[in-house]
Image (tube, rainbow, N blue to C red):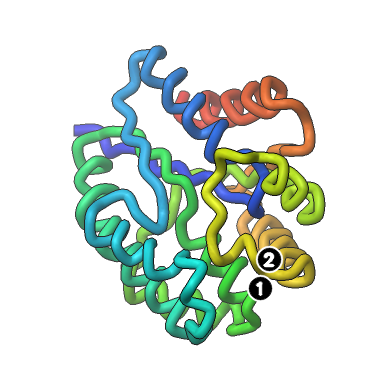
Amino acid sequence: MKQGRFITVEGSDGAGKSTILKELYDQLVEDGYEVVQTREPGGIAIAEQIREVILNKDNTAMDIRTEALLYAAARRQHLVEIIIPALEKGAIVICDRFIDSSLAYQGNGRGIGMMEVMNINQFAIEDKMPDLTLYFDIDPEEGLKRIAQHDGREVNRLDLESLDFHQKVYEGYQTLVKQYPDRIKVVDASRNKEEVFVSAYDIVKNFIG
């Protein structure tokens, strides 16, 4: 049986990636592909419970290393319950965030160190990296403005961080784009939704053939 494809969607808060991911899923299903749509942290019961702890706005006392470890724990459970089984069945898995988020947010944003966070996650993922990553690139200040204008969006603990934190996250993503140019493809998320979708869809279609 043909091995599936693991595609992740990344970006700073307010980049609009979750909206485009849903449209990508719908279009690929319409095209006749078997597709599994999921997210991190979450996707399955145990990981969703961990998500509630991580993103709860009341948990302001959470240590930064605790935060990084919780993300890795949720990722492990998600991987073995959802991602790997779907890939083994030959499906395309499209996941809203994966390891790059931890590297950008906890590694660079929190200042733990991107290599240190990678080491934590190596134990969790056992070298299971995405085949393709779409990085939705938007200025952090513009992303936060979008969040403030979006009444229906979930506002979590990370959204309450300072602009300086989100700038460091953005810089972390820029480092990853340079480090993994074959895997990470940049989508200009500052444009309107239709243009962003077309760009993202073209990248995905060219990749899966």
On screen, residue 45 above or below 115:
above
Residue 18 visible: yes
Query: Disc 1 residue type?
Result: Gly
The residue at 56%/74% (across/down) is 106
Q: Is residue 26 left or right of residue 78?
A: right
User: Which one is in front, 171 or 122?
Assistant: 171
Q: Is residue 75 left or right of residue 119?
A: left
Other-residue count near label 1 (Cα within 10 Å), few / some / many at <14 / 14–19 / ≥20:
many
Callouts 2 and 1 close, C-beta under 8 Å: yes
Other-residue count near label 2 (Cα within 10 Å), few / some / many at <14 / 14–19 / ≥20:
many
Quadrant of the image containing the N terminus: top left
Residue 175 visible: no
Q: Separation of disc 2 and disc 1 at Cα?
A: 5 Å
Where is residue 40 drawn, in percent x and y?
Answer: 41, 54
Label 2 residue SS: helix
The residue that disc 1 covers is 109
Answer with the quarter of the image where residue 180 lies: bottom right
Query: Disc 2 residue type?
Result: Val
Where is residue 159 drawn, in percent x and y?
Answer: 62, 60
The residue that disc 2 covers is 169
On screen, residue 125 above or below 25:
below
